[in-house]
């Protein structure tokens, strides 16, 4: 069954009927998820300690995927995403490195989040180390799902504008996300705002190309969602041509003025 958390700030009251596991009581169920797919007592204890130090008091069995008896928000290629409760009763997510991940650790993602989370680009960072990242929980939907549904055009326009603006902030901070050309699962949309998530490929050493990658991924790629969006925005061939030229200009010399020209070319202003 799919649960929905409707409370605006996502406090635990909304989850009364769901199972909670106290992080003070290690169990097989918990360890299997914290050290997936190959668990050991050491691994489990280290991660439980880290979570406790970051203020996590319990894990919530919630989400559409499951590891043994525990429901989880997601099982990614490199990590497991769990819903957790913090000391003050608010909800957060714990992104836990999979034991079979091709990534050595989460340190890179952790240090990028330290830069971007203060600027409201990502969900707020609560704590992180090499195996665990705790972020505020955003009660939202990933952009891909939203575009597959029947969201209103004016909503979509506001969401795209906010996402592009956050990409511009990333460019200005010198952070390249690295995966925004496939934007559908990297933009999380909620009533509280639009957030760019998943910084596993991000870097401060490459030239940032967030705005150009995001817009190309959303509009210029050859796939169904991009062509739907293009027709939703009623972009003509001429406007598409103009957009490509503005993106080239932005790539050469990124700046707010050309960003505004881009937004008005794609009718978001
Ligand atoms: N702060 C958050 N609030 C709510 N949901 C979140 C949050 N962070 C991540 N998620 C959910 O978890 C999913 C996976 O997160 P993320 O992409 O960071 O993990 P990943 O392991 O890198 O996944 P993948 O291997 O697919 O790249 C997201 O698509 C989103 O649905
Ligand atoms: Mg990822």
Image: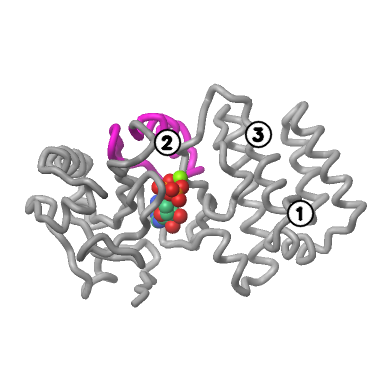
Q: Nearer the viewer, residue 154 or 180?
A: 180
Q: Residues within 10 Å of mark 2 (few under 14, many from 20)?
A: many
Q: Is residue 43 magenta?
A: no
Figure quadrant of residue 3: bottom left
Residue most toward the bottom? 1
Query: Which label belongs to residue 113?
Result: 2
Q: For marks 3 and 2, give the one nearer the viewer.
A: 3
- Whole-percent x, y for residue 68 in the image: 22, 62
Labels 3 & 1 near each other (Cβ < 8 A): no
In the picture provided, is 108 more to the left or to the right than 210? Answer: left
Separation of residues labelled 3 and 2 (CA atoms):
18 Å
Mark 1 — residue?
A: 269
- At a point 26% along the width and 60% down the height, the residue shown is 67
Q: Which residues are magenta?
A: 105-132
- Few, some or many residues within 10 Å of mark 1 (<14, 14–19, 20+): few
Please tell me whether residue 110 belongs to the stretch shown in magenta: yes
From the top left corner, tell me how far across and down residue 253 is, in percent: 76, 27
Q: Where does the image place residue 28, in percent across and percent down from the top left? A: 11, 55
Beta carbon of the mark 3 residue lies under 8 A of ligand 2: no
Q: What residue would you read off at disc 3?
A: 209
Label 3 SS: loop
**Pointer 3 and pointer 2: residues touching (CB < 8 Å)?**
no
**Label ID, residue 35:** none
Q: Earlier in the sequence, mark 3 or mark 1?
A: 3
Quadrant containing the N terminus in the rendered view: bottom left
- Which quadrant of the frame does ligand 2 lie within? top left
Residue at the image point whose x is 40% and y is 65% from the top: 8
Q: Nearer the viewer, residue 182 or 68?
A: 68
Q: Label 2: state its secondary structure.
A: helix
Q: Earlier in the sequence, mark 1 or mark 2?
A: 2
Image vertical order of residue 11 relative to residue 40, above or below: below
């Amino acid at each position: 069954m799919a649960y929905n958390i409707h409370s605006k700030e996502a406090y635990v009251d909304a989850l009364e009927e769901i199972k909670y596991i106290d992080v003070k009581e290690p169990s097989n169920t918990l360890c299997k998820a914290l050290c997936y797919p190959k668990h050991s007592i050491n691994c489990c204890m280290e991660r439980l300690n880290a979570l406790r130090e970051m203020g996590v008091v319990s894990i919530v069995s919630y989400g559409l995927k499951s590891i043994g008896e525990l429901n989880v928000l997601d099982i990614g290629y490199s990590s497991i995403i769990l819903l957790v409760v913090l000391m003050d009763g608010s909800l957060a997510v714990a992104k836990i490195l999979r034991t079979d991940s091709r990534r050595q650790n989460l340190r890179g993602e952790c240090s990028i989040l330290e830069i971007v989370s203060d600027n409201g680009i990502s969900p707020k960072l609560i704590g992180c180390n090499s195996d665990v990242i705790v972020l505020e929980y955003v009660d939202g939907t990933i952009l891909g799902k939203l575009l597959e549904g029947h969201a209103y055009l004016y909503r979509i326009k506001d969401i795209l504008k906010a996402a592009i603006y956050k990409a511009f902030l990333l460019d200005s901070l010198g952070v390249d996300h690295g995966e925004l050309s496939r934007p559908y699962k990297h933009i999380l949309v909620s009533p509280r705002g639009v957030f760019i998530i998943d910084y596993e490929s991000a870097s401060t050493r490459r030239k940032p190309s967030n705005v150009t990658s995001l817009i190309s991924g959303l509009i210029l790629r050859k796939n169904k969602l991009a062509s739907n969006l293009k027709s939703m925005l009623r972009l003509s061939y001429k406007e598409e041509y103009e957009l490509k030229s503005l993106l080239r200009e932005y790539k050469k010399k990124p700046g707010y003025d050309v960003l505004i020209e881009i937004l008005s070319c794609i009718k978001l202003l």
